[in-house]
Amino acid sequence: MLAGLKKNAALEKKLLAGLQKEAALKKIPIIDVTTGRFLEIICLLTGPRNILEIGCGTGFSSYFLVKNLKDGYYTGIDLNQDRVKRAERFIRSKFPKKQFKFLTGNALKLIPELQCNFDLVFIDAAKYEYPLYIKAVENKLKSGAIVVADNIFYGDKIFKKEISKHNLKSVNGIKEYISYVTDSDSFSSYFFDIGDGISISKFIKK
């Protein structure tokens, strides 16, 4: 048994390293493995039935969200059609028995059309749109749902007084998101120094 576990861990490590290398060569932004493991643990502890990922990319982060999904359903959204196709092929090859779908398009237009409520949402798309994502998905959250947002520290730029014009829109979007999930009575939020900063907000339906 232990030998099997070690072998599986080694194979997974090799798989993830290969995906990271490919993403770096093609300059495709992905989460780091530590953040991925964090998502994996959250899924193990909460056992979500419906997961939504906003900004699924090529499926690297999707891997950690889908890995331990039992009877639930995963929905991934990304604006880039090529990345969505690659994500779907990858997840289908690794988890052929899991239930999932990938959608191409603007998440702000697609979310209102989704016909289910979610108990886990992972946000990792355009930073300046973070406030819009949380507002769009709020009425589709189950009571007790967990919303995780990545890149909350944005390379520590949110802590700096002077922000370049190039980053200003994204930084302001993240700051607005932080204010929204901390000031709202509907969310209880926590922040962790993991990867590029992660926020976890628990939704309390009023």
Image (cartoon, rainbow, N blue to C red):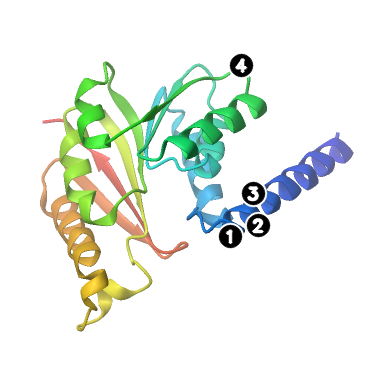
- Image-based side of 25 in relation to 136, left or right: right
Alpha-carbon span between mark 3 and mark 1: 9 Å
Q: Quadrant of residue 91?
A: top right
Q: Residue beneath label 2, please? A: 21
Q: Between label 4 and label 1, give the one nearer the viewer.
A: 1
Distance between mark 2 and mark 3 Cα atoms: 5 Å
In the foreground, 139 or 81: 81
Location of mark 1 (residue): 24
Mark 3 — residue? Answer: 19
Q: Secondary structure at mark 4?
A: loop
Q: Which residue is mark 4?
A: 97
Q: Which element type, helix, strand or loop, lies under badge 3?
A: helix
Q: Earlier in the sequence, mark 4 or mark 2?
A: 2
Q: Residue at x 30, y 55 (%)?
A: 190
| Residues at circles 1 and 2 in contact by the CB criterion of under 8 Å | yes
Q: Are marks 2 and 3 in contact (CB under 8 Å)?
A: yes
